[in-house]
Every structure is written in C-alpha cells, then in structure tokens.
Image (cartoon, rainbow, N blue to C red):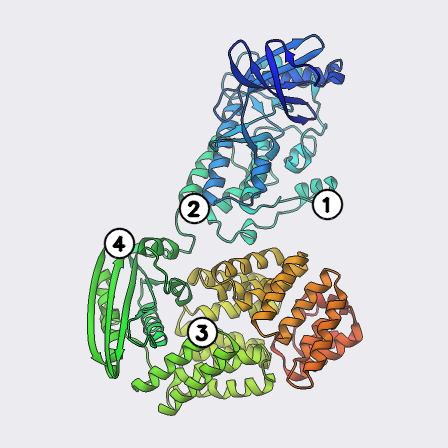
Amino acid sequence: MEKQRLSHFRILAKIGEGGMGLVYKAEDENLRRPVALKVLPPDLVGNAGRRQRFLREAQAAAAVRHPSIAAIYEVGEDADAIFIAMELVEGRTLRAFLEDGPPAIGEALRIVTEIARGLERAHAAGVIHRDLKPDNVMLDADGGVKILDFGLAKVFEASEPAAAGISQLQTRERDLTKEGSLVGTVAYMSPEQARGQTIDPRSDLFSLGVLLYELLTSRHPFRGPTPMDTLSAILKERPLPASDVNPQLPQTLLRVLDRLLAKDPEARPATAKALLEELDAAARDSQRPHIATASEPASRSIAVLPFADMSPQKDQDYFCEGIAEELINALTHVEGLRVAARTSAFQFKGRADDVRRIGQQLGVESVLEGSVRKAGNRLRVTAQLINTGDGYHLWSERYDRDMEDVFAIQDEIAATIVGTLKIHLVGASAVPRVRRSTENAEAYNLYLQGRYWWNKRSEGGLWKGIEFFEQAIGQDPAYALAHAGLADSYSVIGYYALIPPKTAFGKAKHAAEQALVLDAGLAEAHVSMALIRFWFDWDWAAAEGEFRQAFACNPSDVRAHMFLGQLLAATGRADEAEVEWQAALELDPMSPLTHGIVGSGLFFARRYEAGLARCRRALEIDPDHLQSLWAATGLAARIPRAEEAIEKGQRAAALSGRSPMILGMLAFALSAAGRRDEVQALLAELETRSQQEYVAALARAWIFSSLGDKPQTLEWLERGYEERNSMMLGIAAMADFDFLRGESRFMDLLQRMKLPVA
C-alpha cells in the first residue's frame, strides 16, 4: 500500500492479506492505540457487491461484543479507500499453532471452549460466522482466543433481541446470498453449507468440530487430494476415529467430537450453550488418568511396584521383580480389587517418581513398594502401602526370614493389603494366597530368574530363560508354572523363526502339555497352549478355545486378551478383535508389548494410522521395543510414510542383529520409497546367510513381494507353509499380498490355512 495514512490512522506494516481485504498494523493517532486496519483492495472499491459484503462484515462483528471476538472500532473512508478499524490481536493464527503438533488435551479443550463461548454470543445476537477455520482464529500472546473475519457472516432471527442494526443487516444478507449458493471455505463447511442449503448456528458447530479434531490429532478429518474430494468426504464419509490417531482421548470427549461432526444437524448439540456443557464434562473427564476405571470405589485399586534390590551384591533383581509379580497375581484374584498389570506397574522400576504421580499415571489410589535384602539363605523383605492421594503410609512391615519362608511372606503381605484397604468380602476367600505349583524354594528361585529373562524378549534373554526353567523343572519336575514358562520361551523363539519353527514348537507343545497335565486350572498353561494352536498348528478354533479357558481361570490375563485379538484380526473378525484389544489396554495401559501387539493386529485389519499410533505409544514407553519397531515399519510403509518406515525398520534390524524376518519387513519400507537396489541387496544378504544359518522362507517371500515378483513370492510362500512359519497367518490380511489375489496357488494356500479368501 502506497499510502502511509488513512484518515487518522498511521500505517505501520502489512500483516495479512485475504480475499476480502488487506490487513495492516496501524496507530490510531486520536486515541493513541494500536489497531488492525482491514482495507478493501482498491480494484474492488467500485464493486457494489464486494463493497456491501465488506461493510456487512463490520456490522456483523460490531453487533457482537465478547472477549473471544475481535472488537470492531469503526468503519471509515478516505478518498478512494474504505477500511475497518478493529482490535489488533498480536500472536499467531490457530493454523500456525497447529503446525507445532497436537497440544495437550486440556489445552485443546480450552481453545475450543473459548471459541464456543464467542459463537454462543454471536448466535445469540443473530450472527452465524460461516467461515470458521484455523486462519480466522488468533491466539494472542497470553493464549487468549479471538475469532476474526466475519466477512461471510449470515444473519438469522435470533432467539433473543439482536443488537441495533441487525434487522437492516438481514435485508442486505438476503440480497447478497441466495438458497443454493456455496459460501465458505470447503474444508470447514458443514454438509448443509456444502449443499448450499439454508443453515443455522449448528453449521458453525460442525466447523468447530473440524477444528477440535485437528487440535486432537494434527490431521483434518475429511481432507482429500482435491477440494472436490474433500467436499465429497464431508457429505458422505465418516472420519477416521480420533482415538485411532490419539489413543489417549477420553470417551466423553470422543462422544462430543462425534456429535459435532454429525452429518445431520439434528444430531449435533442444539446450541453453543449446550455444547459448552458437554465440553465442560469432557474437560473434567480428561483430567482423570486415561485408563479404564473399575466400578468399585477408587480406594479398591492398587499398583505393586518391583521391589528394590538392597543386597550387597545387587544380584537379586530377578527376585525383586518376581516377588512383586507373585503379589500382583495373588491380588488379581481378590474380588472388588483392581490391580495395575505387571507391565504398566513395572514401568516405574528404578525411577524416583513421586508416588502421587504414579497414582495419577496408573489410576490407582494405593501403591505397594518394598525392598529385598538377601544374604545367603536369609531374607529381609520390607513392604509399605502408600496412599497416592496424599503420599502418606497406610501400613509398613519388615520380615526377617529364611528363604524357605518366602511363600508365607507373600501370603502375609497380600492378606495385610486386603485388610488395610478394608475390602469387605465374604468368608475365607477374602484372604488371597499366592498361587504356586511348587513348595521347593530353590525351584521357585530358578523360575523367577527364568521369567525375568523371558520378560526381556531378546533372543539372548529367551535362551537364558530356557536354561533357568529347565533347572527349575530339574529341582521339581511337577512344577507346572516352570513348564509353562519353558513353552512360552520356545513359542516366541519359533514365532520369530530364530530356529526352524517345527523344532521350536515341538519343544513348546511338549512343555505346555506337561503344564496342563500337572495343573489344568493354570491360566498361564492355557495361554501357552493357545499360542501353539494359533502360531503353529493354525487351528483357529482350538486356539480360541484355549484362550477362553484361560479367561475362565483368570479373567484378567492380559496375554489372553491381547493374542486372542491378534487371532481374531488375522481371521477376519475385526470387530471382535477390537473388544479383546480394548480389554488388554484397559488392564495394562502402559505396556509397550500390549500397544505393539495391538498395533500389529491393526496392521492385519488394514487400519494403518491407528496401528501406527499404537506403536508410537509403545515406543514412547520403550524406544527400543522391538515388536513395536517391527510393526511400525510395516504400518508406516503402507500409509505411506516411507522415511519413518525406513527409520523404524533400520533401528529394528540393528537391535535384532539383522533378524531375517525384520529385514523382510524393512524391504516393504524400502520398496515404498522406490529404493529397489537396497531391496535387492537385502535379498542377496539373506541368500548368503542361508548358506551358514537358518533363514526363514517367509522373509524372502516378503522381499519378493515388495519387488512385485509373483512367481518367486508364491514359491517362497509355499516354503513358508512347509516350514510352518507363524507369520504366515497374516498373508490373507496383509495388503502386500493383494497382487496375488486370483492366483490359483495363492488362493489354494489360503484355503489350506483356513484363512479368509474374500
């Protein structure tokens, strides 16, 4: 702009430009205050329609006074220029704010609530904004919200007396807009606005729903490659559930979001005032820890943390974890007591977190922590029960006993917890006992070491676990839990094809059968057998039956829910899988394995964004979690986010010592990025290594699939079938094999495995 002054305003700098005008920072020389001047471009001053619409913006905004709406000071003309002087809001647009990624849920709700309050006042004054979008919302330096740009505002008959001048503005509005005209910004239009139909204030609420979705997920709910695609999505499609992108969102908030984005205005909140009540409820809910809450009072919830190793040699880590895990298992069977799962509770191992923060993270009202000091055959175990609300001790005790008394110590601690929390149950069953299948303290000690290493899930850890489980069985051949641990170790080794699956699962099946013979009521043994039926026998019905039997023994068995969901997803029962995954996540919300397994299951269900969100959550908890890195590689490659897929795949390959199965998944990521030479290099590497070590056939099938080589893919899939590779169970669900649909060999393979062929 060449002019340095308009009327009594001194132009300082240009700060924006849009279809309805140029915006400058200026100084009101009469009142000595900064203002924003919106100036109609000179070439439009003579356009009667644009001039009327420009003036209408000022009149519409001036009719509404509210802290969340930028104030209009005056409208003026100077020679051939017409301008609006308004409140100068220094800060950044909501669009710029969104570029930083999603804010905390509470902050997102605060922003949307302030916008809703401004809309409530505008609607009460008879004004619909019609162009609510991130570019028309400013956040000032203090985080305050200001709605701008009423250039497309529509006036309607409000339910309360409108500001002066509204009736005249309505007449002009009818002259400027007609039924069937398309007015607004496509990506933020309501369906009725997109159709050019008559709108009411609920149209603005739909646009606000789009803003809320973006704040919660950093993505647009309907964005398509072209404006017409976006328009079609707004009219016809449901957005990806926000919880798939951000699993931390509370259900109350998700319900508000669904109502705002309803296609039918009747399904949305009736007014902005009604919406504010719903947002207030969502805000209260978002302040609670985002895990499922039991129906019992909060005081009936507990987390058992790993006990601290106070032994001089610091060599009792396994025992400290084991005693905590045994107490978790015992307390889980107490009716009316909600117990944080092992993996979630153990995330706080070795951390100096305030117990009140732990309570908030896990959603529990009490925490049991303790320590172990072992010298020779003597034990000193201390335990203290703490109220997470105020950090005060509810109970503490010290036990000086021989190692042979460890079972009695655990029983005493569990019984005291129940008494202290005053859980009123009927009869002797109110006193929990640690379930054990041995009275041999040495066998128990060896078993704890086996589970300690098994829980690490590394190849070296699995083999160490096998050693300890076998030693425990040597001490007590009737130790059912040790047999189940041995079965689990060989099953995981077989699943990742670290040795030929037939060898691994043969050993796993023998151990699981022994565990069930020794104790048919042991949930762990039923899960062990279920995984063998699932991963190796490919007997889907028998596997599901074993999982269900595990629930009968222990309804809170996280692994049963987690892997049953995986089975259901692989066999085309996605809705049922969702139920099991939700149960697993509610029981163990801070477990990277649970999130990672759900993520890989969502890969089978072809819900790639949701699966990747789960894996990212797992990697927030444990950045080196191999299962989640592996699953994230395939998920990101499919979206496609090739660079993220490659980064995750390369990290997984390095952590696993270049496991062939992980290299096979990395090939999909490299192929998605067009890096076929590197895919060929992976193929050559596996060919060379196969001369010296076992390389799973399915790994090469994946690589040939990523290259689009049908004959070789089919050949190596057949070999994978002959090897009984566990990951063959995903071939029907993985989109990477869709190019084989219609090939008789592939369809025959699916039928032999009893996988979905449609």
Which residue was labeled with disc 3?
455
Query: Seen in the image, is 368 located left or right of residue 153?
Result: left
Marking on residue 286: 2
The quadrant the C terminus occupies is bottom right
Residue located 61% across and 40% down the image: 263
Q: Nearer the viewer, residue 56 or 629?
A: 629
Residue located 46% across and 37% down the image: 110
Mark 3, residues whose alpha carbon is within 10 Å: few (<14), some, or many (≥20)?
Answer: some
Please tell me whether mark 3 or mark 1 is closer to you in this view.
3
Which residue was labeled with disc 4?
391
Please tell me whether mark 3 or mark 2 is closer to you in this view.
3
Q: CA distance from mark 1 to mark 4?
A: 53 Å
Mark 2, residues whose alpha carbon is within 10 Å: few (<14), some, or many (≥20)?
Answer: many
Would you say the residues marked 3 and 1 are in contact, meaning their CB atoms lie under 8 Å apart? Answer: no
Q: CA distance from mark 4 to mark 2?
A: 23 Å
- In the rendered image, residue 610, in percent from the top left (x then y), is placed at 58, 56
Q: CA distance from mark 3 to mark 1?
A: 45 Å
Does residue 587 appear in this view? yes
Mark 3 is on which residue type? Asn
Q: CA distance from mark 2 to mark 1?
A: 33 Å
Which residue was labeled with disc 1?
225
- Which of the marked residues, 3 or 4, is nearer the chain's N terminus? 4
Mark 1 is on which residue type? Pro
Q: CA distance from mark 3 to mark 2?
A: 32 Å
Would you say the residues marked 3 and 2 are in contact, meaning their CB atoms lie under 8 Å apart? Answer: no
Query: Seen in the image, is 632 located left or right of residue 443?
Result: right
Q: CA distance from mark 3 to mark 4?
A: 30 Å
Q: Nearer the viewer, residue 457 or 287?
A: 457
